[in-house]
Image (cartoon, grey):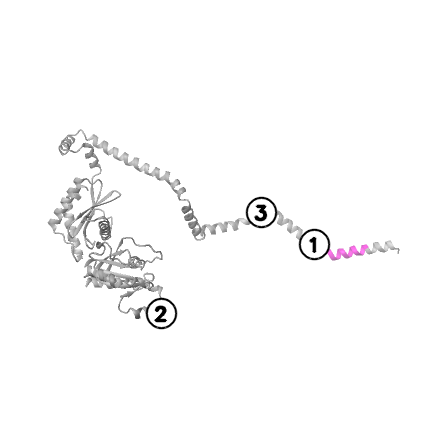
């Protein structure tokens, strides 16, 4: 069965939301940084089990807090991907507060918390991070290398179809 | 033997010795002279140089021709890019007349086309249908000029999208030429609509029209969804009213649903209903 779902990507500026979408949709990565203004909508169809899932991805402009966004940007979303940058602590310090705000407004939406830019930290830093924040994130990914990108979107897709 | 004779004998012996010793050197020297002379002739004669150097030059030219993009591509690209960046005004000055000519050609062609069509209209002016039309126009308060212009640029429905207001997901569509990806259009229209309504609206107002190029997108808002109609040509208030009435009737008759989950069945059902209901307006302007 073919079914459509809306997924929003949230997180600070420059954490790699647009790059994750680009990697997932067209399997490409660019080192150039372009700030997203407003929102950019993309689409990816994936087969999960017997379903053809059309994921409409709303790549929303980043910010320290996104609670000022037009409500329609996140209204009706079935999935939330919250992205932080593994190399910038400031981008994960407000996750709880931000997610509480969006969970209250989207109680039925499934969530995934992603630590991006895995390629920029070494194994020692990775182990430190994993020990310190065990259980508080879902995936550590890299839009640059493609590590865990497909996996995180598919995991969310599976949740949304359940 | 006197002293003079002795001296002459010594000189003769010296000459003999000199001849014996320098004979080989002289032969070598003569050979070198001959070779130098030969080389001098070759260097001075253009024909000689050409016949000897040409094969090398030809090989080099062929190599450069075959490998031009690899050898000079990057340098040329960066030079051209720099040149363009540094000479934007000159570029505009150079292109302006060409663009101007193109626009002038396009406009004059369009005017020619319009003139032909107006001529056709005028030729029909004295037919009995024209008199009936004119009488109708008189009652409706519409001038002949307005009618002719309206007929020439008749509104044409190109695409229709039923979009869930909250999620921006496509819940049904009809398209004359399937120009765009409906899912993407639905998402982006909802994003634009959200942005405008959030940024500029203090009260409960909603975005109703978006114009771009020769198209107008009319947004008809309902409670849980909205219908976006892409129209080309001149959208008169009369046409807009007719469209609104038709869509209100459509919404009422088919009890359109856009709520979760938005499945293929739901999209198909809505799309079929849309096509059936808009058939008159679609057929009319085909």
Q: Position of residue A56 (x, y in %)?
A: 24, 56
Mark 3 → mark 1, Cα distance in angstroms: 28 Å
Does the CB distance between marks 2 and 1 fall below 8 Å?
A: no
Q: Position of residue A86 (x, y in %)?
A: 32, 64
Callout 2 and callout 3 share a chain: no
Please tell me how crowded label 2 is: few (under 14), some (14-19), or many (20+) other residues with Cα within 10 Å: few
Q: Earlier in the sequence, mark 3 or mark 1?
A: 1
Q: Position of residue A57 (x, y in %)?
A: 25, 57
Image quarter of residue A121: bottom left
Residue located 57% across and 45% down the image: B47
Say which of B217 and A90 sits in front: A90
Residue located 16% across and 44% down the image: B243
Q: Which residue is mark 2?
A: A124
Q: Residue furthest front?
A: B202
Q: Which residue is mark 1?
A: B27
**Element under disc 3:** helix
Which mark's residue is nearer the viewer, 2 or 3?
Answer: 2
Quadrant of image for the C terminus of chain B: top left
Residue located 79% across and 56% down the image: B14
Q: Residue furthest top?
A: B126
Callout 3 and callout 1 share a chain: yes
Q: Which residue is mark 3?
A: B48
Please tell me how crowded label 1 is: few (under 14), some (14-19), or many (20+) other residues with Cα within 10 Å: few
Q: Which residues are magenta?
A: B11-30
**Element under disc 1:** helix
Our reading of the magenta stretch's main secondary structure is helix
The chain containing the residue under callout 1 comes to B
């Amino acid at each position: 069965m073919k079914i459509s779902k809306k997924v929003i990507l949230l997180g600070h500026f420059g954490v790699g939301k647009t790059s994750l979408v680009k990697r997932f949709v067209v399997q490409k990565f660019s080192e150039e940084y372009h700030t997203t203004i407003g929102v950019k909508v993309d689409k990816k169809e994936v087969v999960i089990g017997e379903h053809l899932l059309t994921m409409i991805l709303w790549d929303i402009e980043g910010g320290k807090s996104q609670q000022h966004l037009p409500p329609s940007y996140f209204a009706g979303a079935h999935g939330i991907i919250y992205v932080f940058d593994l190399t910038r602590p400031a981008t994960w310090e407000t996750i709880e507060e931000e997610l509480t705000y969006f969970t209250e407004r989207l109680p039925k939406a499934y969530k995934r918390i992603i630590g991006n830019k895995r390629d920029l930290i070494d194994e020692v830093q990775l182990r430190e991070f994993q020990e310190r924040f065990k259980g508080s994130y879902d995936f550590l990914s890299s839009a640059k290398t493609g590590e865990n990108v497909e996996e995180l979107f598919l995991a969310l897709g599976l949740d949304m179809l359940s | 033997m006197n002293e003079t004779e002795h001296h002459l004998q010594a000189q003769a012996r010296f000459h003999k010795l000199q001849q014996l010793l320098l004979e080989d050197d002289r032969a070598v020297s003569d050979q070198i002279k001959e070779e130098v002379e030969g080389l001098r002739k070759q260097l001075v004669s253009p024909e000689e140089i050409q016949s000897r150097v040409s094969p090398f030059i030809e090989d080099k030219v062929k190599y450069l021709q075959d490998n031009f993009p690899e050898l000079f591509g990057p340098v040329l690209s960066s030079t051209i890019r720099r040149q363009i960046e540094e000479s934007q005004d000159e570029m505009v000055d150079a292109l302006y007349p060409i663009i101007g000519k193109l626009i002038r050609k396009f406009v004059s062609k369009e005017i020619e086309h319009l003139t032909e069509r107006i001529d056709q209209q005028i030729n029909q002016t004295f037919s009995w249908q024209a008199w009936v039309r004119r009488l109708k126009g008189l009652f409706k308060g519409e001038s002949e000029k307005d009618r002719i212009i309206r007929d020439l640029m008749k509104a044409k429905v190109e695409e229709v999208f039923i979009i869930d207001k909250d999620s921006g997901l496509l819940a049904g569509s009809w398209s004359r030429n399937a120009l765009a990806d409906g899912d993407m259009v639905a998402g982006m229209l909802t994003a634009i609509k959200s942005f405008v309504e959030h940024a500029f609206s203090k009260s409960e107002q909603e975005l109703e029209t978006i114009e771009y190029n020769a198209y107008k997108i009319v947004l008809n808002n309902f409670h849980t969804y909205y219908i976006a109609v892409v129209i080309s040509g001149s959208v008169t208030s009369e046409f807009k009213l007719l469209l609104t009435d038709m869509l209100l009737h459509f919404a009422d008759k088919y009890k359109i649903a856009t709520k979760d989950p938005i499945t293929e069945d739901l999209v198909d059902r809505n799309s079929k209903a849309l096509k059936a209901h808009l058939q008159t307006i679609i057929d009319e302007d085909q």
